[in-house]
Image: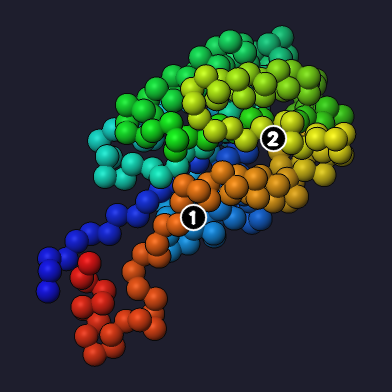
Amino acid sequence: MSKVKNIIWPQVFLFGDSITQYSFQAGGWGSEIANRLARKCDVVNRGLSGYNTRWAKLVLPRLLPPSLSNTTPAAVTLFFGANDYSLQDKNPQQHVPCEEYTDNLKDMVKYLNSAGVSNDKIIFITPPPLHEESWEKECILKGCCLNRLNTVAGQYAQACVQTAGQCGVDVLDLWSLMQKDGQDFTIYLSDGLHLSVKGNQFVAEHLWGLLESRVGDLPFILPYWADVDNKNPEYSLLCD
């Protein structure tokens, strides 16, 4: 029998704000991706609610240190912007100017490259559109006024798309797709900003279209149960 080796599972690394953090809830887009990749790949959720790209680029090396070269991700999603595009005069804590937002995305790509993640493994996701009336109600409940606008969300989404092109990475433009042909995008949102069940399904389907070519052909890890040699399970389970 050959020497037993540890099993290193490929990873899909999801990095973003609350829309990523909440993606592992029941019916979430992250949990759907994880379900599709069961027994093939670990889907790692590193969503940080409320974070913008200014903070994200600082903590990324702590979450994905270069020393973990044996677990270099098969794919990484960068899903930021929903906090960056907050209005500066209404929400200065989270606001990041659009030019800095694009620079921060570029810096994160550079870091990922230095950690061994090539551009073909990186996917940007733009913020979804904002339904201002619904989000204003949420803001009022929290004791503040409307602090985001859909037109500004669109500016950041466009900047994200342009930056993806400059960096040579794929991008999922939710802001445009969810409003395509003038459709009612409110069905994709739960509170005007975050995703509804339909919104999570929308993201999962479109993201899978980009992920499938990267991870869809990964083999099952460990044999199917019916293929295990019951008389000599060690040979089936411990040998390459």
Left or right placement of residue 162 versus residue 106 in this view: right
Circle 2 packing at 10 Å, graded few (<14), some (14-19), many (20+), is: many
User: Relative to 75, is 134 on the left or the right?
Assistant: right
Which residue corresponds to mark 1?
216
Residue 172 position (above or below residue 28)? above
Q: Residue at x 43, y 53 (%)?
A: 42
Q: Nearer the viewer, residue 159 or 60?
A: 159
Q: Is residue 232 visible?
A: yes
State how far apart marks 2 and 1 are (Cα): 22 Å
Q: Is residue 71 above or below residue 58?
A: below
- In the image, 100 versus 74, the foreground residue is 74
What kind of residue is marked 2?
Answer: Leu
Q: What is the tally of numbered marks visible in this picture?
A: 2
Compared across the picture, whether 40 is left or right of 1 comes to right
Q: Which residue is mark 2?
A: 174
Residue 183: x and y in percent read: 86, 38
Residue 217 locus on image (x, y percent): 45, 57
**Kind of residue at badge 1:** Gly
Q: Is residue 7 above or below residue 173?
A: below
How crowded pointer 1 is (Cα within 10 Å; few <14, some 14-19, many 20+) is rated as: some
Query: What quarter of the picture does the N terminus occupy?
Result: bottom left
Screen quadrant of the C terminus: bottom left
Mark found first going from the N terminus, 2 or 1: 2
Q: Does residue 140 appear to the left or right of 51 in the view shown?
A: right
